[in-house]
Image (spheres, helix red, strand yellow):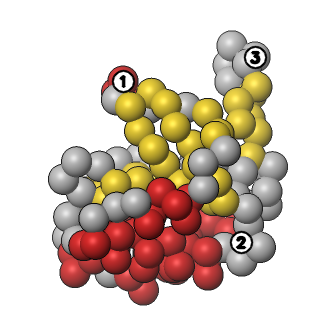
Amino acid sequence: MKRVESSPDNYIASQDPDIREVLEKLHTLIKTALPGRDYCMWEGVFWGGSEQQIIGYGNYSYQRSDKKQIEWFTVGLARQKNYFSVYVNVVEDKAYLAEIYRSRLGKVKTGKSNISFRNLADVNLDVLTEMIEHAGKITTDSES
């Protein structure tokens, strides 16, 4: 995955109306929960080998065990084939926030750092907002 020059707003506007409506609501929620954080498009091959387009909010840099320096986003928003995903790449006390908040997020599927759901009614938006605000409080741009 790499940061690209495409506009997140243009990406959202290009979606079918039902998908666009959900992406717009989530985009506003994330921008509000992370005030002042930069956001941009990321594209390319993602975990599992699939081509993805993700809106990334905030950014940080870290060094992998192989000493390679990686640039990444703090929170990401993506539309998959059958669901929406929010990625929260923040760890507290050796646990990803998605794992910490899992039981309160609603009818969602969670992984280490992602939350997936079919529609907005399935996710507790207040808890999602709380989790993203929490991520913003414990990170600053360029770190996580």
Q: Quadrant of the N terminus?
A: top right
Q: Residues within 10 Å of mark 2 (few under 14, many from 20)?
A: few
From the image, state whether disc 1 or disc 2 is nearer to you: 1
Q: Residues within 10 Å of mark 1 (few under 14, many from 20)?
A: few
The residue singled out by tag 3 in the image is: 67
Which label is found at residue 137? 2
Q: Secondary structure at mark 2?
A: helix
| Quarter of image, res 134 | bottom right
Q: Secondary structure at mark 3?
A: loop
* Kind of residue at badge 1: Gly
> Relative to the observer, which residue lies in front, 90 or 21?
21
- Can residue 99 be seen by looking at this rendering? no
| For residue 9, side relative to residue 99 (left or right) | right
Q: Are marks 1 and 3 in contact (CB under 8 Å)?
A: no
The mark nearer the N terminus, 1 or 3, is 1
Q: Is residue 98 above or below residue 47?
A: below
| Quarter of image, res 22 | bottom left
| Quarter of image, res 19 | bottom left
The mark nearer the N terminus, 3 or 2, is 3
Q: Are marks 1 and 2 in contact (CB under 8 Å)?
A: no
> Relative to the observer, which residue lies in front, 34 or 45?
45
Q: Is residue 78 above or below residue 9?
A: above
The residue singled out by tag 1 in the image is: 49
| Residue 63: image location, x then y, percent | 74, 28
Measure how far apart labels 3 and 2 are at the Cα level.
Answer: 27 Å
| Residue 115: image location, x then y, percent | 35, 58
Q: Residue at x 66, y 59 (%)?
A: 39
* Kind of residue at badge 2: Lys
Q: Residue at x 61, y 33 (%)?
A: 2
- Can residue 70 be seen by looking at this rendering? yes
